[in-house]
Amino acid sequence: MKEITQVVPQSMPLAPAKVPAQEGGKGFMAFLEQAVGEVNRTQIESDRAIEQLQSGQAKNLHEVMIAMEEADISLRLMVQMRNKLVESYQEIMRMQV
């Protein structure tokens, strides 16, 4: 059974792995690709659960609702991460050198 307090899927790391200085951009890009992939996976699983419920294949409404909420929370987290990234970029661009 999944914990309700878990916001980020366990397979999604909270911080990018340490990589050499030359590959720093690639490491961050790989982290973003993985995070977006996880959000996409939860959205697809949610859609599949809804389709199964509509066709009568799903037995538990609870599981469908959990899948939908997990997808919603992961999407909200991704949007907030994007907002913080954009905000950080704008702050850096405002800095005077």
Image: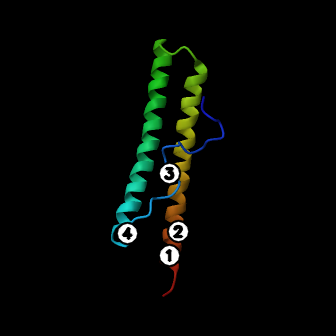
> Looking at the image, is mark 1 or mark 4 earlier in the sequence?
4
Tell me residue 84's x, y (percent): 54, 61
Mark 3 residue type? Pro
Q: Is residue 35 left or right of residue 83?
A: left
Q: Residue at x 45, y 13 (%)?
A: 55
Q: Please give the residue where the numbered disc 3 appears in the rendered image.
A: 13
- Label 4, label 2: how many angstroms apart (C-alpha)? 23 Å
> Looking at the image, is mark 3 or mark 4 earlier in the sequence?
3
Q: Please give the residue where the numbered disc 4 appears in the rendered image.
A: 20
Q: Please give the residue where the numbered disc 2 appears in the rendered image.
A: 88
Foreground mark, 3 or 1, reads 3
Identify the element where label 3 is drawn.
Answer: loop
> Looking at the image, is mark 3 or mark 2 earlier in the sequence?
3
Foreground mark, 1 or 4, reads 4
- For disc 3, the neighbor class at 10 Å (few under 14, some 14 to 19, many from 20) is few
- Label 1, label 4: how many angstroms apart (C-alpha)? 23 Å
